[in-house]
Image: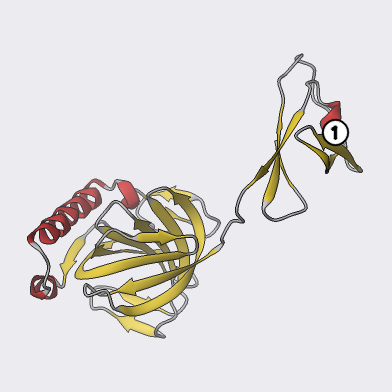
Amino acid sequence: FVFPHTHSCAFVSIRARLRSSAPIRVHSPPFVFIRVPSHPFVRIRVPSWIPRLPFAPTCRLCYAPPVMSEVVVRKLNAAGEETYRWTGRLLARTPNSITLEAFFNRYDRLDLGYAVLERGDRFIEHFYSDRWYNVFEIHAAGSDALRGWYCNLTRPARFADSEVVHEDLALDVWVGADGTTLVLDEEEFDALPLSEEERKAARAALTELLTLAGQRSGPFSSFTSRDGRRESGNGDE
């Protein structure tokens, strides 16, 4: 069991081992206070049913930094110059990836030729520190129908506590909700002053994206509904 402490930077971990198979009866508050052996002057307020469980609880006070719910995304060009920034809400984080939810607000309507974006479109944005791309899952404002996935070829992203920085390499991929793919801006990519190693890494990432999209696997295997659940299928509603 994990219960919040009075401070935002602390939590209490209550560990216990079952002593019997007796049913657990959950009682409503009032709360009671229990002591933490490692911190004799600290008392933790917990629901009154905790001491009545059919096992012996032990407590440990742990400290952790507060969870950052908002993350600033900084988009840089290949020369390292910032070209745009926005803010997203943190949905998930691993050592090598961050997933955010953000909403399109740069234009009222943007016709890309192969897709149309509108103000309020919902983006689920996947950033990776060990891959040469990111993937934006795009949902229509209002209906929340899946429009498709916009993929940017980038250098591996850099993560801080509340910031994501990625360097765009111009080359992009559009994956429609029906699985069709379109490679974009290859001429711009070819004109960039990149090393041979960077070109090979970006081309390999492009092949990986097209393979994942063709197999409907990885970030293309499902989409994220408004309530945060992952749904399989092609996004038709």
Label 1: how many residues lie within 10 Å, few (<14), some (14-19) or many (20+)?
Answer: some
Residue 90's spot in the image, x, y percent? 51, 60
Image quarter in which the N terminus is found? top right
Residue 83 on image: x %, y % = 32, 80
Asked which secondary structure carries label 1, the reply is loop
Could you tell me residue 80's position as x and y percent? 27, 74
Q: Residue furthest bottom?
A: 108
The part of the image, by quadrant, that contains residue 224 is bottom left
Q: Position of residue 209 (x, y in %)?
A: 22, 54
Q: Residue at x 37, y 49 (%)?
A: 96
Position of 28 relative to 194 (above/below)? above
Image quadrant holding the C terminus, namely: bottom left
- As drawn, is 6 to the left or to the right of 179? right
**65 or 2: nearer the viewer:** 65
Front position in the image: 117 or 75: 75
Name the residue tied to disc 1.
49
User: What residue do we see at 62% from left, 56% from top?
Assistant: 66
Is residue 106 something one can see in this rendering? Answer: yes
Please say if 207 is above or below 114: above
Residue at 36% in and 58% down: 127
Q: From the viewer's perspective, tell me whether residue 72 is left or right of residue 234.
A: right
